[in-house]
Image (cartoon, rainbow, N blue to C red):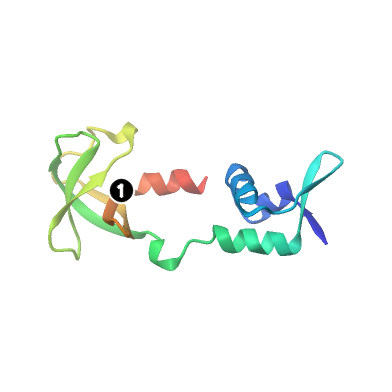
Amino acid sequence: MDIKLKTFCTRNELVRKEVDQLVKRLGVKTYKVGGALHISEEDANIILNEMALPEELTPQLVEGVVLGVCRNPSWVMCKWDGIEHKHPCLLPRRFKGRFPKGKRIKAERIEDKNGVTYRHEYFGRLERR
């Protein structure tokens, strides 16, 4: 059985542009029926497996205290609860300059091959839209 690509994206809460790029990269066969793109169920399962994040890349939510602003105002130095040293945290543009010393913030802790990065939780909300 075949599935409309648009229905597949809404049912699985995926972004259509990312799915289109993945379809091109994987070479998944698509065909049009009445102007709507369709894919087979096997190809849909392949796309879902590719879109799933590995668990080690899933961000953790941490909470900490702002120690001060870095030279680049898009970053603040924070002391995270349960983590020994202070680390910089990336802020969204709209929050630049809004976090005084002592303010408590939440951030996503992301570990990858390059190391550990902290970014304000607002970025995660933007990606989930």
Identify the image quadrant of residue 101. Answer: top left
Residue at 32% of width from left, 60% of height from top? 113
Estimate the x, y position of residue 43 in percent, counting from the top left.
70, 60
In the picture shown, does residue 45 fall above or below 73? below
Estimate the x, y position of residue 25 in percent, counting from the top left.
60, 50
Estimate the x, y position of residue 90 in percent, counting from the top left.
27, 43
Estimate the x, y position of residue 78 in percent, counting from the top left.
17, 50
Residue at 60% of width from left, 42% of height from top? 17
Classify residue 55 as left or right of residue 100.
right
Residue at 75% of width from left, 62% of height from top? 41
The number of numbered badges drawn on the structure is 1
Classify residue 36 as left or right of residue 14.
right
In the picture shown, does residue 122 fall above or below 97? below
- Check disc 1 and report the residue beneath it: 119
In-front residue for pair 22/99: 22
In-front residue for pair 29/108: 29
In-front residue for pair 120/22: 22
* Label 1, residues with CA under 10 Å away: few <14, some 14-19, many ≥20: many
Residue at 44% of width from left, 47% of height from top? 125
In-front residue for pair 94/111: 111
Q: In terms of secondary structure, where does tag 1 sit?
A: strand
* Quarter occupied by the N terminus: bottom right
Question: In the displayed image of the protein, which residue is found farthest to the right?
Answer: 34
* Amino acid type at mark 1: Arg
